[in-house]
Amino acid sequence: MEYFVQQLVNGLTLGSIYGLIAIGYTMVYGIIGMINFAHGDIFMIGSFVALIVFLVLTAVFYSLPVVLFLLIMMIVAMLTTSLYNWTIEKVAYRPLRGSFRLAPLITAIGMSIVLSNFVQVTQGPRNKPIPPMISKVYDIFGISISQKQIVIVVVTVALLAIFWYLVNKTALGRAQRACEQDRKMAALLGIDVDRTISITFIMGASLAAVAGTLYLMYYGVVVFSDGFVPGVKAFTAAVLGGIGSIPGAVLGGLMIGFIESMWSAYFSIDYKDVAAFSILAIVLIFLPSGILGRPEVEKV
Amino acid sequence: MVQAVSTNRVEAGSPFPRAIREALYAGAISFGLFVLLVGLKTDQNIRNELIIVQRWGLLAIFVVLTMIGRFIHVAFVGPALEERKRMKGKAVPVIAAEPSYLRKNLINLSIVGLFLYPVAIVLLFGFQGSLKWVDNFGIQILIYVMLAWGLNIVVGLAGLLDLGYVAFYAVGAYSYALLGTEFGWSFWILLPAAGAMAAFWGVILGFPVLRLRGDYLAIVTLAFGEIIRLVLINWREVTNGSAGISGIPKVSFFGLISFNVSDDNYIAKVFDIAQSGAYYKIFLYYLILLLALLTAFVTIRLRRMPVGRAWEALREDEIACRSLGINTTTTKLTAFATGAMFGGFAGSFFAARQGFVSPESFIFLESAIILAIVVLGGMGSLPGIAVAALVMIGGTEILREMQFLKMIFGPDFTPELYRMLLFGMAMVIVMIWKPRGFVGSREPTAFLHKRKAVAGSFTKEGHG
């Protein structure tokens, strides 16, 4: 039983990170119907920026509270990845809007190759380990919960609350939801569609950056190719929850996190990625609209 | 590259003030993009700790280059394109001149050229000197040509985006590697077997995804491709895990002439000539050339058969296709199976050529490269794909040869590192510049001659 609860805790941590990345996929898909394949690499760039900021901070200031450290890392990572995603959307995706259906997907794959290789060329191909930032572990009824895990869950919940407010209570969120339903009608009603789409990309990137920072803090290592597998898993989460639905993305992320940690604990750790990919295939084939998604109506 | 805030105002007169403004914007944005990732480098010191190395000079170069690029784009390229568009509107239609002899027979001539290529190389560089040119340039490019032609059946003809094509390549390679090393069967028996095996897997993996369309199909095929690779890594009892399988037997000339030095019928003994590794490479070159031409031939013939027409119809409009009573299930499955079969052929050839296979060769990036070649060449166009493979694979191979770049950028400069970066950039730029590929995609073979214009309101965006 304790073992099981322990796995639940681990799954919750992993799931939070996946959920944060998944929101970026789901929002972009909701608004322009495109799988932003480069989103995983945006996450990786967020992680790398956090790493660089961490190293700069440790070189300049010797003793700062860890909270401040994390906060600065997150903010710089958010700003940088937002700029990246904004630029990419403008340069690579916007000219292709209205082109044939697969064009944006292929461009996004190209962009993903560019981003990961750009980081490989500029930062080197090696693993980048950092010393543990937080190492305290609590023992509650035989279940060990590390402070890292608490930080991850708290940050995720706080961000989701802010994000929920932005999407549901502000004019910006209303514009976003309007564009999601009918872009042409939204434009007729005076919503700047291009600007709304740009902001969607920026929001997705910021959440991915936070996920990247938390990932770096949790695992203590990052490498240029780290965008692919977490990216695919987060996409799986988005699909599982129902693509286009933001609560669905979070729910899907948690489910993927639980499944992965349970699978590694009770079956075999070698095949944990196989499990994730199989879930992706199974969900897409048998439940394409996901758990919370609306079924897609085929229009002739 | 960086496209800053675009102004919609029509500006008469000199574009330079605007260009300078845009260049400054671009500079600011690129500074933001590169300040951390280029200006600072994480490096390991002797104690294996990460330290920061500062590279402000490199950052300045990046920013200045972006600004210059943006300036040229706004000041010169933009107006030139506008001018051309205006001229095009006015231009009188030119009556097409009778194409020259060279133009009409370009394809036949290039096939003849391909057959003569090893002979020319041997005459130029001798047997030992020819190894690099036949192997790295000839065989390597032709493998990709064949793979891209095989994928073209699925993506270009049937319009099903397959991101896991490399799985079938892997099935072919492992079929030959396992059966060849375990039972010692000959390549000529295992080649069709590998093709059949890959086609079988094409049907198995194709069957569940029949209901999906477009990008969902792409993601599921990606997942299948990754699953196969992960199984190859983890099923150590059979596949030997990531260590791979080595000692895969060489191909023989139908058992008559062998390329193993120890055999009695070794080619040098049969013809009484000097020993050289080049004979095998040249033989492999002709083998892959024939396999690739077989792929092209089958594609061309299939395109004229009902199933090929059905593929093209499926690509253009699936709903119309179903309304006309075409069985989309079998149509899609045959496309998957045929494409996979050629992937399997190429895979078993790859295993025979390398003598070694490991899951490393079948990563997602390979699928992306093959897909990029198909898309960049223009989906459905065989010559276009061949040209794209030549440019992309040949270009990246040439990067290895460019040692003179070390003179410019210093001795630490390794051009190979930039291979995939340039590849990705080419993919993005060609997609933006010419979404239908740089040679042009193939129109449906059969269509109504009287074309009607359809009003924009009838076509839904993103479904073209």
Image (cartoon, helix red, strand yellow):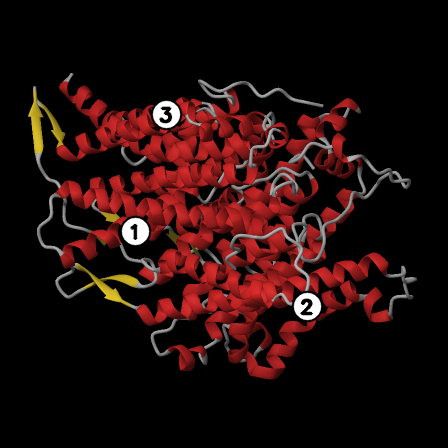
Residue B12 % position (x, y): 68, 61
| Mark number, residue A164 | 3
Q: Nearer the viewer, residue A4 or A177?
A: A177
In the shown orientation, is residue B210 left or right of residue B170?
Answer: right
Give the residue pinned by disc 1: A49
Verify CB contact (< 8 Å) between mark 1 and mark 3: no
Q: Secondary structure at mark 1?
A: helix
Please give the name of the residue rendered at 62% of the width and 19% of the height, measured from the top-left corner: A297
- Give the residue type at disc 3: Trp
Density class for disc 3 (Cα within 10 Å; few <14, some 14-19, many ≥20) is some
Please give the name of the residue rendered at 66% of the width and 41% of the height, measured from the top-left corner: A100
> In terms of image quadrants, where is residue A192?
top right
Give the residue pinned by disc 2: B114
- Give the residue type at disc 1: Val
Please state which of the two labelled residues, at mark 1 or mark 3, is closer to the viewer: 3
Residue A46 % position (x, y): 33, 46
Q: Is residue B51 above or below residue B412?
A: above
**Same chain? Circles 2 and 3:** no
In the shown orientation, is residue B113 left or right of residue A215?
Answer: right
Please state which of the two labelled residues, at mark 2 or mark 1, is closer to the viewer: 1
Q: Secondary structure at mark 2?
A: helix
Please state which of the two labelled residues, at mark 2 or mark 3, is closer to the viewer: 3
